[in-house]
Amino acid sequence: MRIHKLSSALVGVVAVLAMTTGTPASEAAAPARPSGAAASAQPDSDSPAPDARHSERVIPGTSGAAARRGLPAEVSRRFYELNASRHQGPVGVYEDAPSATDTTTDALSSWTGKYHAYWGVFPTGATLRGAQATHSVNLSTPVTGDDTVYAPTLDPSNATCIEMTTIYSGGTIWVGAWDWCAAIPGWAKYVVVDSAFLDTYTKKVNGRPSYSVQDVQTNAATNEWTSYLYNYDTHEWETFFKSANTSKLGSSGGGWDMMEVYTHYDPTTGQGQYCAETKGAVFQTTGLKYQTSYGGGWTAATEANSSVATTVKSSDLGCSDLSYAVLTPNSGFSLTNEKNPTGPISNSAGMCVDNRVGDTTNGNPVQLYWCNDTNSQQWTLNLNGTITAESKCMAVKDGGTANGTVVELYDCDGSGGQNWQTRADGTIYNPQSGKCLDGTANYTIALTQLQITSCTSAVNQRWNMPT
């Protein structure tokens, strides 16, 4: 796994370009068949048949120069930075898939600038001439901050012209085709994932809306590649985009189906900014298949013809709550952003830890109050040791260590006074002071401000934590 720590300056990319070696889908001729004789329309499964009928219909979308202009400039710059060093051809030299010798890191607190990594399945052996997968769409994952998530993204090999991906950025979700065969690589076409897209091109797979994509070489002589999406209404593959470039004919190896992220460090959580917004999200690939020769048959991704990025840590993607699972070796995998425990912190008297009157001013008392399920009592236990509510941290006043030092709400700053550990005996421990969160002798009385005192495991120091 290669970790890049970038300065705030981004690699320059020309985002507006009228000329491209790719052919906009609206101008494309009827697509060549990627394999076999013509196949009639047929009922689909979770993974459509690769040789189902390929119709002449071109999927509507934004293409050509308009596609270069249409997506946010950062979405283009970030994708280029993520992939340019790994993609042979006009943009650089391919790097191998992650290995045990790659440099990784668990500590994220020293980030400067941007941070990114990847997690997925990588073909081995023959250079692919086609790949197909079914990708989930997370409708409740509007990445609204400065980050961009590309998940999953499908790229058959170094010889391909097209990389297909699902883009989460700025509160919008797109499916887009990146043209690596253009004179200056960039977005060649995209569609918004809206109700019309969902109705036509997705079906529920493991309970999640998912679309099926195929990226295949359709002319060996010119190295033309065509990407297709499967229409679940007509049971046919429809053309999304095509591009050609003979300079990549000699390219070999490479390829992936993976999740990528371009994120900034968030000092409030100690994670990438996208991590909080994507809690509960599952990014899933199923039905991953390979075509190893032009016009040849298709085979599922297996442990024999692909590898999984098993050495990559969740923290390498800037989100320690991520968990990776191989559903079907190696044709199906998922990446889940587990939810941090969030909810009320209560004591045996039925009182809840409360941000007094919901005031988010620094220094506002953290107190006991009757449990009422308001935002002032919704506390999140973060993996970096902070306990947060209303976007601020529970903090020992001035980082004090003396018995009786009060607890307040404050901007998260990574200081020791904001670091807590929940322990098996029900206490909440502050390592900097060596003391425990205490409701005092007045632990049954509303408006009692919390403090730290020497740990005794007494009833006024024991808490029921969210799960």
Image (cartoon, rainbow, N blue to C red):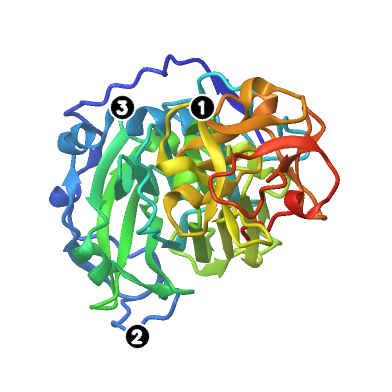
Query: Badge 3 local density, few (<14 within 10 Å), some, or many (20+)?
Result: some
- Which residue matches tag 2? 43
Q: Which of marks 3 and 2 is in front?
A: 2
| Residue in the image at 59% along x and 57% along y | 351
Q: Label 3: state its secondary structure.
A: loop
Does residue 304 sit above or below 19 in this rendering? below
Q: Where is residue 92 in the image (x, y as percent from the top left)?
A: 49, 25
Q: Would you identify the image quadrant in which residue 20 lies? A: top left
Query: Seen in the image, is 427 located left or right of residue 19?
Result: right
Q: Real-space Cα distance between discs 3 and 2?
A: 40 Å
Residue denoted by label 3: 183
Q: Residue at x 39, y 60 (%)?
A: 137
Secondary structure of the residue carrying tag 1 is: loop
Q: Is residue 260 above or below residue 82?
A: below
Residue type marked 2:
Pro
Reading the chain from its start, which is encountered first: label 3 or label 2?
A: 2
- Measured as percent of width and height from the top left, residue 425 is found at 82, 55
Q: SS for tag 2?
A: loop
CB of mark 1 within 8 Å of CB of mark 2? no
Give the label, 3 or 1, closer to the camera.
1
Mark 1 vs mark 2: which is more N-terminal?
A: 2
